[in-house]
Image: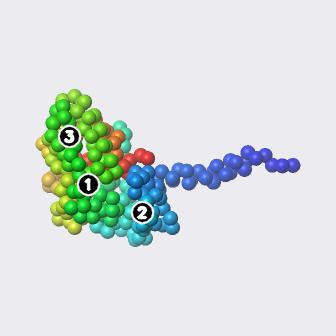
Amino acid sequence: MNPSPRPALLLLFLFLLPALIQAGDDPAERLAKAYPGFIKGQQGGDLIWSDGSQMPLDDGRKKTFDQLLDEPDIQDQFTWTYPTGPSSYSPPGFNTDPGRVRYEPLFKKMYGADSGAVQRNLVRVRWMPKSANSTVMITRVNGVDKKLEAVSRELDALPPSIRKYAYPTAGTFNWRPIAGTKRLSTHSFGTAIDLNTKYTDYWKWDKKMAYKNQMPREIVEIFEKHGFIWGGKWYHYDTMHFEYRPELLNP
Ligand SMILES: [Zn+2]
């Protein structure tokens, strides 16, 4: 008697299930989906770029919090899941900073290895023409300028009481290390924007470092929809700060 094919199929499905569940959480796969013009996938533990070059995903080291920030590898960028949705606005847990870990060679390769190289990719975007009517400089690499234009249009359509938090802007491109560190600020790559400082809360400005936020969810949700993460979801909060990190948002 031939065994029914069904148990075999079921077994195969159960065998594949973990791979299916993990697929969205694979760092290389997330990066390839987020940056299809640059990244192809992985092979033998290396991230494979479209130009054929490779970068190791994992240096195999266990790290303290400071080491994660100062000496990350690519997969360390995914140490914490960036939360989205209505339940994602409670104060972040101790040292939970999804997006603050950045493997610099990855960003330098995409956006430019020095100030001049980044600046050659900057373009002017009109910021909220109906309300702020200013301009900001942002990179065109990965279509970030187009994403920010879409953000700007949607912010401009919000009620005045909400959109006032989004202008005047407080800076986009600035090639500089983060104060007190050797790490480059993500503003160095022309992929970040700071909004109205009048309503901002920043961990370094607060002696007590007790989480606070004034930024309306409507604004955060618009940015997230277009691939930008928000610094208000970090334990080391920076609520005026948004940066283009689509690999951390739902694929
Ligand atoms: Zn910022």
Quarter assignment of residue 68: bottom left
Quarter assignment of residue 71: bottom left
Residue at 26% across / 48% down in the picture? 242
Find numbered disc 2 in the image and state the secondary structure of the residue it sits on: loop
What amino acid does circle 2 point to?
Answer: Asp
Spot occupied by residue 135 in the image (x, y as percentages of width and height): 17, 43
Say which residue label 3 marks: 126
10 Å neighbourhood of mark 1: few (<14), some, or many (≥20)?
some
Quarter assignment of residue 75: bottom left
Name the colour scheme: rainbow
Distance from disc 1 to disc 3, alpha carbons, whole Å, reads 16 Å
Label 1 close to label 3 by CB (< 8 Å):
no
Say which residue label 2 marks: 51
10 Å neighbourhood of mark 2: few (<14), some, or many (≥20)?
few
Mark 1: is the Cβ under 8 angstroms from ligand 1? no
Spot occupied by residue 220 in the image (x, y as percentages of width and height): 28, 41
Nearest to the eye among marks 2 and 3: give it.
2
Disc nearer the start of the sequence (2/3): 2
